[in-house]
Image (spheres, helix red, strand yellow):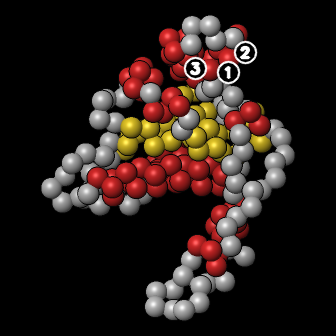
Amino acid sequence: MNETIALLRRRRSLPPAGMTGPGPSPQEIETLLTLAARVPDHGKLTPWRFIVFEGEARTRAGEIARRILLENEPTASEARQDAERTRFSRAPLVIAVVSRARPHVKIPQWEQVLSAGAACMNIVTAANALGYVTAWLTEWCAYDARFCAGIGLAEDEKIAGFIHIGRQNMTSEDRPRPALADVASRFGAASPIS
């Protein structure tokens, strides 16, 4: 079987709690970002950018999340605070893909958003090809304006995903995948693809 097809068949997400180091090297991170930037980009707008969280930067991002938690829930337990504090340090590397979709005379914003999603998937696929496991997450902090400002996003930018990357430290079962007959059809044909 073709190596790329085999990789795509076996790829699945692993929760960051199931990851360990070492994470990607500087050269591997450069490869991941270079491949992320090779996605379809109608109009050559570059409607995305990347923020790399590694080392202590992961803890600083988690501390921003913890402070916001306390603004929202001043009596949050230590365990809950610790969960936020370690949000970005469970995996050795986290790459945020930031969508910079903006109104354009020719290119719909939807296409720009899809390009950012494709950048996320290129990082996921490339990291798996390098032997790492990944989890593409957003969670509450991706949608919180205070958190986004705290990590340097402009008001018109959005998080397309936080890609957590590391080495597998636990086993996990693959989730059930949809039957093709439920999600695919041929235009004009009476029967679905099976």
The quadrant in which residue 105 appears is: bottom left
| Badge 2 amino acid | Ala
Q: Is residue 31 visible?
A: no
The quadrant in which residue 159 appears is: top left
Q: Is residue 156 visible?
A: yes
- Which mark's residue is nearer the viewer, 3 or 1? 1
> Residue at coordinates 64% horizontally, 79% vertically from top-left?
181
As drawn, 72 above or below 98: above
As drawn, 23 above or below 4: above
Mark 3 or mark 2, earlier in chain: 3
Q: State the residue in front, 162 or 66.
A: 66
Quadrant holding the C terminus:
bottom right
Mark 3 or mark 1, earlier in chain: 3
Q: Looking at the image, which residue sits at the far left?
A: 105
Q: Which residue is mark 3?
A: 62
Q: Position of residue 150 (x, y in %)?
A: 42, 20
Q: State the residue in front, 121 or 101.
A: 101
| Badge 3 amino acid | Gly
Indicate the secondary structure of the residue bearing disc 1.
Answer: helix
Q: Are marks 3 and 2 in contact (CB under 8 Å)?
A: no
Mark 1 residue crowding within 10 angstroms, few (<14) / some (14–19) / many (20+): some
Q: Are marks 1 and 2 in contact (CB under 8 Å)?
A: yes
As drawn, 82 above or below 189: above
Q: Which residue is mark 1?
A: 83
